[in-house]
Structures are given as C-alpha cells and as structure tokens.
Image (cartoon, rainbow, N blue to C red):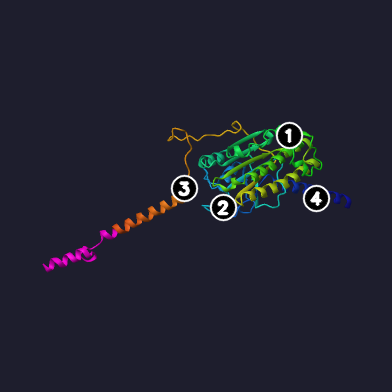
Amino acid sequence: MLLENRRRMETLFSVAFIFCSAFTAGVQGDSLTILQAPGYVSFQKGDWPISGEKIPDMVALTMGFSVQEDLSWPGLRAGQLFQRPRANMLVVVRGVDSLALPQNVASYPLENPVPFTLDSVAETVHSLFAEDTPVVLQLAPSEERLYMLGKANAVFEDLPVTLQQIRSRLSQDGSVLASLPLNSLNRNAEADLLFLSEVQVLHDITALLQRHRHLAQDHSPDLYSLELSGLEELGRRYGQDSQQYRDATAILANVLQKFGEDVFGLYGGSAVVEVVTVKSFEAPLTRKSRSILESKQISNPGSPYNLAYKYNFNYAVIFNIVLWLMIILALAVIVISYNLWNMDPGYDSIIYRMTNQKIRLD
C-alpha cells in the first residue's frame, strides 16, 4: 500500500514537472533583445511583449522618424527631440528562441513572429537624407539577398555576398576559423559551413566599418539589417539537442555580444543594436525582387531631372524658431491693437494733449 502511494506521488510529481517545464518554455519563447543603446534612447526594462510586425515601427521611432500608427508599447519611451542615434543595427537570428546575451539593455518577449522587413525605414532614410548618401544595408547570406543604398555601395563593395564567395573567404587570411573554438563543428559539412559563413560576414562588416570610420561622423543615420539562419539549418541537420547545435549557439552568442560592442564603439556610443531571436516564422516571407546594388530614385514632380527632395538637417530647429517667432509677433499685434482701440486720445497720447493746450492758448 505504501509502495503504491509512493509510486502515485512520483507519477504526479513527474507530470507536474513536465507541465512546468513546458509552461516555462512557452513563457520564454521568441525574444527581442536590445544589446546596445545610447542613454537618450530610453528602453524600459519589463516583460512587455511586442508583435513581430511592429519591429519596423520600433526601429523607425528609435531613429526619430514618424510612423503611420502610434506604437502603444511601453518598452520604448519618447526620447530627446534633437538628439537621435546615428545608426541602427538589427540582427534577426532564426532557429533559436533565445540567446545568452547577459550584457544587454533590455529584453522583451516577441509574440506573433511574422516575417518583417525594414524596407519602409530604408525608404524613409533614403528620401530624407538622399543628399548625404547614408548607409543602408540589408543582407541575408543564406538566401544570397543583398540590398544597398548610398555610401554602402562603396563601403561594402568587397563584402562577400554569395555563399560561394563567403566560403572562399573562410579559406583566406583573417578568417574566423583561426580564432573560433569549433569544438564539434565540422568546417567541411554543408550546414556547419553555412553557420560559419554568417559569422564571417559579421566579422567582415565590423572590419569594413573600422576601415571607414568617417561614416560615423556624418549627419545622416545609417541602417543595417542582417538575417542569420545558420542555426536553423544546424537544428534541421543534427537536431536541437545535439552537441553541434549547442556549440553553435554558444559561439553565436559570444560573436553577437562582441559585434554589438564593436558597432556601438565605432559610432561613438550613438548606435542602437537589436537582436531578434525567433524559432520559426509563422508565414513565409514574400519580398519584391531587387537587383544587387539597386538604388531607388525618389521622384520629385517639381524637378525635371527627377532629383530627390533637398532636406536640411537643421530643419526642425529652423521650424521651431519660425513657429514661435510668428506666435510671439501675433500676440504682440493683438495686444497693441487692443490698447490702441481702448486709448483715450485726450489723456493717453502726448500728441493730442499738446495740440489741445495749443488750441486753448490761441
């Protein structure tokens, strides 16, 4: 009897443990992690979930741009009006719901992980700062998808794009294979090579930014969007409980931590670095195909040469000066007109007073 009761209790504890483990895994889920952010971009720590389709609006607001619909998300507070970051780096990691990134500003659960792109933010940057030619880079190595605008065409012209170019880069000098602890990863396996290629792309981007430090000194904001799916391929190939998957997860977490610190330092502490980890997207991503190094022109009906609209970086300052000056002048005109209307010429005006005395003397 006692043995049967003990077995029942053990069974109940086992079921409760499995339920709690599943519940905890469901709570963790996909996540949005803010790796780096300047002090004037205020992210509040908390467990406020954000929808995947709202990520582009969040990126636009951090860069000081307006969005069509208000973002009712308490994780981001309104920042300073005349001080905005000079760069935003968004890294999407597919195949894992969370990474061990202890040195972060804040982390939030991601709900409704639908595919998203930063095309709207890229078009806003290009339309407002076309004269300053900002850097806009969107890259997905596994899909060989590349989209560059502005100065990115000159800065990242040597960046390997296709998988064949990246794999040949791994065999050259300065490859990450010489510094990474591969452990159980095999540099000759297809899935392992894809993951290592993405790590090499992150290393090459920071190397090119260090070579072109002048990018962080201009007034135009830069936008970077990277999508990594090497972990997803490793999970399919070996399973998520395999040693290869665990080693790759630890490597990517360390690489992303250092990558965020390097980008943040290159821009003088004026950059926002976000990492989105998603197990799998709920719907396939459909994109409009573009050619590599394509530069979209913004039509200007007032110009016969199809030039972009000219934008001055001091537009907000000038607008506020003109606005408040007009308000002050309007109030001054109203006050003066009111006093003139209610003025008594015989007592309030020295001209009429002297004229009245002269008439009396005559």
Residue 223 placed where, x, y %? 59, 43
In screen coordinates, is 9 left or right of 26?
right
Residue type, label 1: Ser
- Contact between marks 4 and 2 (CB within 8 A): the answer is no
Residue type, label 3: Tyr
What span is colored magenta in the figure? 338-362
Q: Main secondary structure of the magenta part?
A: helix
Mark 3 = which residue?
315
Q: Which mark is residue 290?
A: none
Mark 2–mark 1 distance (CA, rounded to whole Å): 45 Å
Question: Which of the two discs, 4 and 3, labels the residue nearer the N terminus?
Answer: 4
Residue drawn at point x = 29 percent, y = 58 percent = 338
Residue 40 placed where, x, y %? 57, 54
Residue type, label 4: Phe
Residue drawn at point x = 65 percent, y = 40 percent = 226
Mark 4 = which residue?
13
Question: Which of the two discs, 1 and 4, labels the residue nearer the N terminus?
Answer: 4
Mark 1–mark 3 distance (CA, rounded to whole Å): 47 Å
Question: Which of the two discs, 1 and 3, labels the residue nearer the N terminus?
Answer: 1
Q: Residues within 10 Å of mark 4 (few under 14, many from 20)?
A: few
Mark 2 = which residue?
77
Mark 1 = which residue?
168
Residue 51 placed where, x, y %? 61, 44
Residue drawn at point x = 62 percent, y = 40 percent = 155
